[in-house]
Amino acid sequence: MAPFQPRRVGISKISQKIADAISFAKLLQEHRGPFHPLQTLTPVILQEVIHYGKHNSAQLLKISRQCRPRPRVGQSQYPARHGSGPRLGSKETPTTPEQPGSYAKVYYTKHIDAEHLIKLYQKVNEGIYGKTAIKVHTGEQHGPYILPRDMVKAFQAQVPDSSIVETNTLYPGDRDTTEKHRRTLEVNGWNFCPVDIMDEKGNVMMPVRKGLHFSEVSLGRNITNYDSMIVLTHFKGHAMGGYGGSLKNIAIGCADGQVGKRQIHAFHESRVPIGSDWSDNMVLKEGFMENMADCGKAICDYFGKHIVFLNVLRAMSVDCDCAGTSAAKPVIPDLGMMASTDILAIDQASVDMVYAQPERDKHDLVERIESRHGLHQLTAMQQLKMGNDKYQLISID
């Protein structure tokens, strides 16, 4: 039987019969490809499968388990980094005869202020030109741990022809419509420069080259209006991703609110029909990380050498800024800021620095990362050849 061909996201017909969803799942049972059968469903067909699953949960649960990717011969069932400390510590790592190969550069400062943020940016901004998007998580109303607006304001003022960019959320809240999103931006103090809600006028399909699951992803339409992108990330925990770094910031943050975010979260939604708790299901967790990596790859490929990454390791709650005022109080101390042209290297270095902290400080955040299989974000980016997980951490202090 020929392999199942994923549907083009956003193209669905109301007349699609529930039988299609059933045969679709059975086909994937034979295919056993590296993606969950429900991941490619459009929102309409997904609802049909959910309806079907309420009455046939045992069958779909069996299919879900059988669709788990098989490890290669000689390969651990879990990624090499899963549940273990990072390979390189949070220190400058020069290339030596004992450590051959190329290394990405990650610049670091222990200071968290506008002056040092600008200095970091100047180390990596050679490819930034023209109309520039600054991707920031602007947060739910009154979120206590959002990046300091005065710091971002001073930084944005140094980037000619730049705007902050965001997209609407899929979940109901303060930012699920453009009108509500605009009010939240005002409440949170993001009124010092233009803020482009990129999916305000719809979406655009962006190709994914040799993706793990997707051949294209749905992004906010206005992303194509920009020549360059600066990914300014509040590094912290995340309820589903384990941690939110540069990958999460662009993957979920640039996906449009109705199609793209549903596309990325499809593994999560699939827990409804199969009766499986997402928090205990490795297939769903790692599938979500791989979906994010596919989306991040599409964005990185689109901008090429004209995208850079800045991670701010402060106020690192185990929760994302989308949790708003309910976010847990951070336990781990502020660690500084990083900059790189390599998305994998900067997220790897940020994770490494967290793991290098004393147990009493890092426990909560590490537990969040590992319980969600968050290190699989790094594995997925490595599989997609998005960057280098070996790096030199270079202090600018």
Image (cartoon, rainbow, N blue to C red):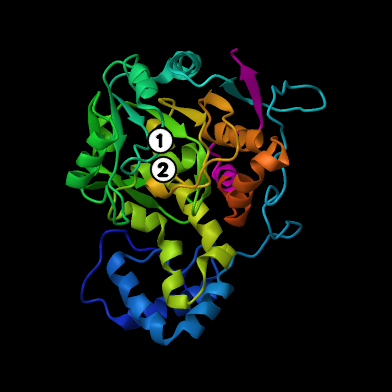
Indicate whether residue 386 is drawn in magenta. Answer: yes
Q: Amino acid at mark 1?
A: Ile
Q: Are marks 1 and 2 in contact (CB under 8 Å)?
A: yes
Say whether residue 7 is visible.
yes
> Residue 344 placed where, x, y %?
56, 36
The disc placed on residue 321 is: 2
For the C terminus, the quadrant is top right
- Residue at x 76% of width, y 27% of height: 100
Label 1, secondary structure: give it: loop
User: In percent of the image, x 41 and y 44: which residue is there?
Assistant: 251
Query: Residue 335 got which mark?
Result: none
Q: Is residue 30 above or below residue 338?
A: below
Query: Where in the figure is residue 222, as x and y percent of width and height?
Result: 24, 37
Examine the structure image and report whether residue 190 is included in the region drawn in magenta.
no
> Quarter of the image holding residue 21?
bottom left
Camera-side residue of 187 and 68: 187
Q: Quadrant of residue 45?
A: bottom left
Magenta segment: 378-397
Q: Which mark, residue 146? A: 1
Q: Where is residue 380? Give x, y as percent.
A: 56, 48
